[in-house]
Image (spheres, grey):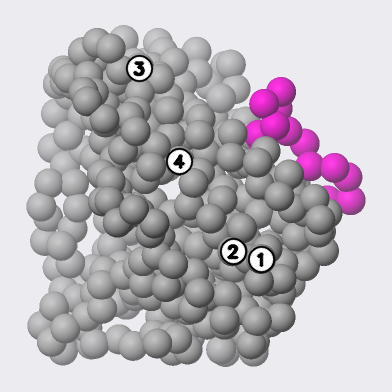
Amino acid sequence: MMIVKPLMRGFISLTSHPVGCEKNVVNQIEYTKKKGLVSGPKKVLVIGASTGFGLASRIVSAFGSNASTIGVFFEKAPAEGKTASPGWYNSAAFQKEAAKAGLYAKSINGDAFSDEIKKKTIDLIKSDLGKVDLVVYSLASPVRTHPKTGVTHRSVLKPIGQVFTDKTVDFHTGKVTTVSIEPCVGDDIENTVAVMGGEDWQMWMEALLEADALSDNAMTVAYSYIGPQLTEAVYRRGTIGKAKDHLEATAFKISDLLKGVSGKAYVSVNKALVTQASSAIPVIPLYISLLYKIMKAEGIHEGCIEQIDRLYRERLYTNESVPTDDKGRIRIDDWEMREDIQARIVELWKQAETENLSEIGDLEGYKSDFFNLFGFGFENVNYADEVNEMVAIDNLVE
């Protein structure tokens, strides 16, 4: 038992709160249940199932569609006196709530890039579910060891060709400053594409197909981001943008692979949200704080669970064909990218400085969402109480 407080190092917390993380998961489940059932998938594999959009996808599948789910993730277990990673506690809470609801749910903790975890996952599908009808690919790792070459690739977030300079904010202090990011060098682009592009997604789908673990009309979806012109040089036109281009191109290759089971692959472009990854990207916290302020005022703000619930209900599982843009992508970032929303952000961006950001932006909302990621800042959780850090994940397949 221990009292758990946030222990910050840069843009992450080294601690996470087991009770707060459980509260976060339960809140998302309650939202989904209130929305009612969707005519969605019934047997679902979520790769990257413990946080963010992956966790929300597992919740909407299970509690919005009564689906059996298998979740794959790579999280740090707790040790005496040391908390687990938030994704560990999130997954423990999900498994607990799924069991209460009588839903099939099992989890695998390990490197999803590896052949070993792919095999273990497919063996579990074959023994327990037979086949799956939805595969969600939501990995967000900065590092990948290639299963065939053994080479370890590390992604970088850098502009291409020239130095990028613009405003940013330290969301802990609210101080607005100017930041410069040097352009990529050497094999930065290739390494970033190897980690965050579509190769591993395709490897998963090839392995599932070869094992006859995909249902007829099976669907797979991966998540991407485009963002505004403000962040374009460092994001969509930078190294990560090259990886996202590769991911989106891979969807067409996978769709070709799945023709034999009448399956289809999609990339869903989602909105900007507070994540551990986005918090470390210069410029993005300032953009998100302005975006949140405007979208909340308009009544169209969404978090992960609202985004994925809408994706299932209004895009993936309607009686009509899945709507896509001219590049074949699902656009669930449509509200963020509305012309009026973006025009207002551009104006506020020019004005943004340390002294006025608390008025023109939603820095408090940003900070709240950030601490929520680690289980902190929830109502009805007494953070002065001792809690049991040694939480186990039920139905964790060893």
Circle on res. 197: 4
**Marks 3 and 4, Cα distance to the nearest angstrom?**
18 Å
Of 367 and 332, the residue lying toward us: 332
User: Which residue is painted at 44% across and 15% down in the image?
Assistant: 229
User: Which residue is painted at 72% across and 67% down in the image?
Assistant: 214
Of 280 and 124, the residue lying toward us: 124
**Marks 1 and 3, Cα distance to the nearest angstrom?**
40 Å
Magenta stretch: residue 39 in it?
no
Label 2: state its secondary structure.
helix
User: Looking at the picture, does residue 72 appear above or below residue 242?
Assistant: below
Q: Quick one: quadrant of the N terminus? A: bottom left
**Marks 1 and 4, Cα distance to the nearest angstrom?**
22 Å
Please state the extent of the stretch shown in magenta in the rendering.
317-330
**Marks 3 and 2, Cα distance to the nearest angstrom?**
36 Å
Q: Are marks 2 and 1 in contact (CB under 8 Å)?
A: yes
Circle 3 residue: 233
Query: Nearer the viewer's eye, disc 4 or disc 2?
Result: 2
**Marks 2 and 1, Cα distance to the nearest angstrom?**
5 Å
Label 1: state its secondary structure.
helix
Of 54 and 259, the residue lying toward us: 259
Circle 1 residue: 210
